[in-house]
Amino acid sequence: MGNTVGSANSDFWNLKTKDDAYIVGLWCADGYHRTSSIGISNTDSDLIEKFRKFFLKFLSAERLKLRIYHPDKFLRRTKAYHLYVNSRPLLRKFRELKNNVTKFINGDLILPYMAGRFDGDGSVAKDFYRDCRIVYGNLGEAQNDLELMLSLGFQKMKIYNYRTAKTFCLYFSRLETNKFLSLIYPHSIRLQKSVFAPRRDLITTVV
């Protein structure tokens, strides 16, 4: 592909790989964009590195820009990273994918996409059983992801509107939390770094 990002023939444009689907989910959750720039902000350096490697499939390293925000007593408790690049074609494609998730994400791309969503804006209790949820900025995105999960056989999920926080949460029932986490585990950087023990029968059966 070289150092350009205008070709419509790349694997990413056709969304063929699970890594691409993960990146889309991660950007939908924690993505950054301005008029002509696109990137990601996160406190997890491993997620930043994952996105950096994706960028390098299309762009030269010299084009990438990384800002590091160190902890201070007023604004942040942990180190934060902001990785971005100026690329209108890449930004247009990401926006297209985000606005048409149910069109582009299907089949074996759903789980890596949801893993990216979870790694960016998801959480679960320390027992990996209670309070499994993903946070969204608008109802449409939450409904799209609910539709994707229903297509995989999940049945006990709900969307809650937290009006004060102006967010929507997609909640997984305790009866389906282990199933969800086990299925996204092979793609989730956060879960693989945790003490969560996936059910191998679910992974080998579905993935």
Image: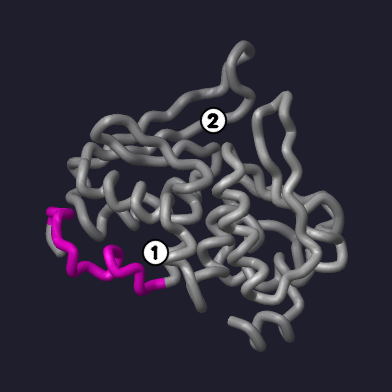
Q: Residues within 10 Å of mark 2 (few under 14, many from 20)?
A: some
Say how many tags the image has: 2
Magenta stretch encompasses residue 24: no
- N-term-proximal mark, 1 vs 2: 1
Disc 1 designates what residue?
20
| Nearer-the-camera pick, 54 or 161 | 161
Q: Which label is found at residue 174?
A: none
User: Taken as a whole, is the magenta stretch helix, strand or loop?
Assistant: loop
In this image, 168 relative to 126: left or right? left
Q: Is residue 5 left or right of residue 74?
A: left
Which residue is at a point 29% across and 44% down the rendered structure image? 91
Q: Which secondary structure lies at badge 1?
A: helix
Tell me where residue 161 appears, x and y as whole percent: 73, 38
Q: Position of residue 21 (x, y in %)?
A: 44, 64
- In this orientation, which residue lies closer to the viewer: 46 or 109? 109
The mark lying in front, picked from 1 and 2, is 1
Stretch of the chain drawn in magenta = 3-17
Badge 2 element: loop
In terms of image quadrants, where is residue 9?
bottom left
Q: Dividing the picture into quarters, in which one does residue 13 lie?
A: bottom left
15 is within the stretch colored magenta: yes
Q: Give the residue pinned by disc 2.
A: 79
Kind of residue at badge 2? Lys
Q: Amino acid at mark 1?
A: Asp
Q: Position of residue 54 (x, y in %)?
A: 33, 57
Q: Is residue 33 left or right of residue 79?
A: left
What sort of colour scheme is used for the picture? Answer: one colour
Q: Residues within 10 Å of mark 1 (few under 14, many from 20)?
A: many
